[in-house]
Structure formats: C-alpha cells, structure tokens
Image (cartoon, helix red, strand yellow):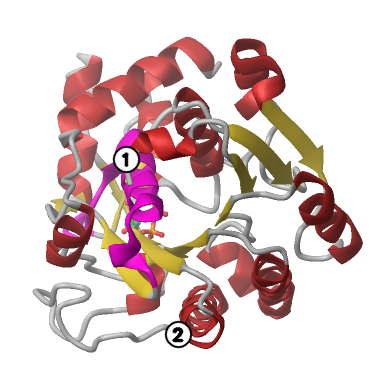
Amino acid sequence: MGTEELKDKVILVTGGAGFIGSHLCEGLLELGAKVICVDSLLTGKTENFTHLKEKFGEQIKSFKFDVNTERGSIELLFRELKPDYVFHYAAMVGVKKLAEEPLDFFVDMQGIRNIFELSKEFGVKKVVFSSSSEVYGEPINPGDKAGASINIRAHDPYALTKLYGECIAYHYFKQYDLPTCSLRFFNVYGPRQESSDYGFVTGVFIRQVLVGKNPTVFDDGSQTRDFVYVKDNVEAAICALLTDRTNGKTLNIGRGTPTTILDLAQRVIAMSGKDYLKPEFMHGRGIEIKHRNPDVAQMKELLNYELQTNLDEGLKKTFDWYKENVK
Ligand code: UDP
C-alpha cells in the first residue's frame, strides 16, 4: 500500500503529545490522515501539538486521559471514532522512571491490554506497537549486533513491558488475525525532545553547550548508541504500518551506524563553534548498557526503506531548534 491509503483514514496515536508521538501525528497529518491524539499529559505536553492544531485544524482531535488506567474513556473513543489504524506509543517514559517505580510495569501492561482488546473488538486494520532497543539488554560481546542472534537480555521493568508488549502483539496476529507489528526503536533524537534526569543525551549535550557548559560525558565516553533522527523514525513507522510484510513481526528501527558518546559530544561542540568547550568526563549512572548496535537488514528488506538523515544533518536541525526554542 502507498501512503495515499492514509488519506482520510482515522488513526489513533496514543502518547501523541510525547516527543516521538507528536512527530508521528505530524507525519500522518501531512499524509492527509485524521489523527486522534490521546495522552495523559503526565510526560507529554500540549505544546508538542498546538502547532498541529493551528496548521491542520479539525484534522486532529486530542483527548487528555490515560489509556492505561481509563478503560471506559478509551473504549468510548474506539466505539465513537472507530479508528482504522492504531499506533500505541503511550508508555511510562524511560528505564530510570520504571526502575524507580517498578510496579508501574503493570500499569503499562494494562494499557497494552486495553489497546489490543479494543483493536480486536472494533476491527482495527493494524496496530503498531512502539518497543525499544532496551529489550536487548547488554550484549554478550561488545560487537554483537542487536537482532542478529538470540540476545534478548531484558533485565529491567521498562524492557520487560516492551518485551511482553511485543509478545502480545504477535499473539493477537497469530490468534485473531489482527495485523500488528512491533518496532524496536534505537536512540531517537530531534526537536522537542525533553532531555532530563531520565536521559536523552543529545538534548542534554546541546543544552549544555548552548549555555557555554562542557558536555558531561559519562565514564570514558566509549559507550555507543545508534542515533536516529525523529523524522526518519516516523517515516519508518509509517512504512511499517503500510506493508503487510511486517504483520506479526518485530523490527529494529535504526541506522546501523553506532556512534560513541565522546564523538557525539565533540560533534555538538564543533557545531556550536565554541571551541573553548571540552568534554567533561564524569562517573556514569552505574548500571548501563555499554553498546547498542542494531542489525537493520530486516528493516531494510521488509520496509524497503533506509533512514535518510545522517548524524550531522540531524544534529544540526536539532541544535537549531533548541537554540530557537529552549531558553
Ligand atoms: N550520557 C552521557 N552524559 C549524559 C547523559 C547520558 O555520557 O549527560 C550517556 C549515557 O551514559 C549513555 C548514552 O549517553 O551511554 C545514552 O544515554 P541516554 O540516556 O540518552 O539513552 P539510553 O542510555 O537509554 O540509551
């Protein structure tokens, strides 16, 4: 199916006021879809989609409630607005947050239950579930490509919600013929990302450098991540929705090009032109994943798509946005 399939389709985006969710809403609106954004606004923000309301008017509807805990509200929404497609992106944000409140695991699982049960009941055409590279845990060998071998080592509550969510998505496809797919997002960055104590290193470094502080590199900075510009992440997710080849599948969404955190810090400094700044090494977070290096062969094959934005291009767009918008 081409993107014209989405014109006038009703698409529910849970977590649509979050960083990735709001970019997804924008991508769908640009393709002519009617978007329903549901968000509890616990971590999502109305500022993330007010510009979309101004630009797209009635084409986007937004509702403030929690899909995890407010079953009656989400059921009513399915009944009355009859979404054609669903992107389930609402979740407790981040590893650290769920590590602090491990039993919130069950809250996210309840949301997964609500979305899959209702999607089945109301005949949704496909559900896309946002998973995470966290499910891989620490690779057995530093060079291991996430996805190339059986190396799932989920060890924290956040990773487990994502892993169980993937299992549920798969079983709904197998048992009930509900088309589903799960996307394991690698480190997404871009405009509107809320960098905080919970991480998101790109925004952390850009903010620091903008106010003339040295970027804080944990440990020796040799840890690696695969950084994905948010617009590419959205394009990949839309491709995943549109092809039946992803039904019942779980895919890595990454560039397949790892970057060390030290390199990232140096790129951000170079971009700022503030060559008096230097990476500031400090003790890290204790437990952390050292390397994350995705195998993206399956993504390229099933989606017939490669991520378009190289790191410097994406960083520049992000840097310019922070400069303009974050005081
Ligand atoms: N990181 C860092 N300095 C910071 C924040 C993060 O060096 O101020 C590192 C962190 O140790 C990790 C990487 O950046 O290796 C990515 O961290 P983030 O929280 O963005 O994502 P995640 O660890 O969940 O991949």
Residue 158 visible in this rendered orientation of the protein: yes
Element marked by disc 2: loop
Q: Is residue 121 left or right of residue 189?
A: right
Residue closest to the eye, 256 or 140? 256
Residue appearing at x 71%, y 68% in the figure: 111
Quarter occupied by residue 204: top left
Say if disc 1 is inside 8 Å of ligand 1.
no
Q: Is residue 125 left or right of residue 134?
A: right
Numbered marks: total: 2
- Residue where numbered disc 2 is placed: 155
Classify the position of ligand 1 by quadrant: top left, top right, bottom left or bottom right: bottom left
Percent of width and height locating residue 141: 13, 83
In this image, 279 relative to 212: left or right? left
Callout in the foreground (2, 1): 1
| Magenta stretch contains residue 71 | no
**Outermost residue, left side:** 143
Give the extent of the magenta segment: 220-247
The residue that appears at 28% across and 45% down in the rendered structure is: 228
Residue 230 visible somewhere in the drawing: no
Quadrant housing residue 264: top left
Numbered tag placed on residue 2 in the rendering: 1
